[in-house]
Image (tube, helix red, strand yellow):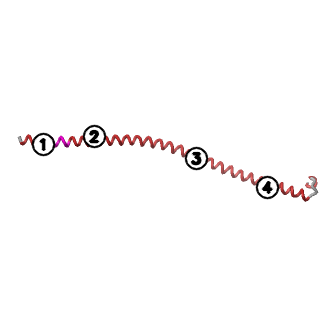
Amino acid sequence: MKKFQAVVREFTKFSVQMANRSYLKSQKLKVTEADRRKIALLEAENATLKKDKAALEQRVRMLKEMIQENRDGAEENQKELQELRVAAQTVVESVGSIGESDGSLAGQF
């Protein structure tokens, strides 16, 4: 009888250990499944962020091109302004020489 009781105790102890192992495995599987879901969500978010980044990089390139075009246009405007200043100075000098002559166009030339 003592041997039977020892076997029953040993079986009970073994059964509890197996139940604990089963419970722990179940918990690990739940955590693993939750982690897989998180990974899937993070991968989707990462893909979205990559698309957003690509769109922003494209926008930055466009803005840089616009800035360069504006700089080029500003340089052209500065040249044109300088040419207009020279033309205006020439007109002013011509008008000044009219005042010094007898006032006729023939007298200027």
- Which numbered disc covers residue 9? 1
Count of numbered tags: 4
Q: Mark 3 points at which residue?
A: 61
Q: Which amino acid does label 1 sit on?
A: Arg
Chain-order first, disc 4 or disc 3: 3
Residue range in magenta is 11-17
Q: Nearer the viewer, mark 4 or mark 2?
A: 2
Residue type at mark 3: give it.
Arg
Residue named by callout 4: 86
**Residue 14 covered by magenta stretch:** yes
The residue depicted at 90 percent of the width and 59 percent of the height is 100
**Which class describes the residues within 10 Å of circle 4: few (<14), some (14-19), or many (20+)?**
few
User: For the residue carrying disc 2, how many other residues have a C-alpha within 10 Å: few (<14), some (14-19), or many (20+)?
Assistant: few
Q: Left or right? Give the position of 94 relative to 14.
A: right
Mark pair 4, 1: CA separation: 113 Å
Quarter of the image that includes the C terminus: bottom right
| Residue 97 falls within the magenta-colored stretch | no
How much space separates mark 4 and mark 2, taking CA atoms? 89 Å
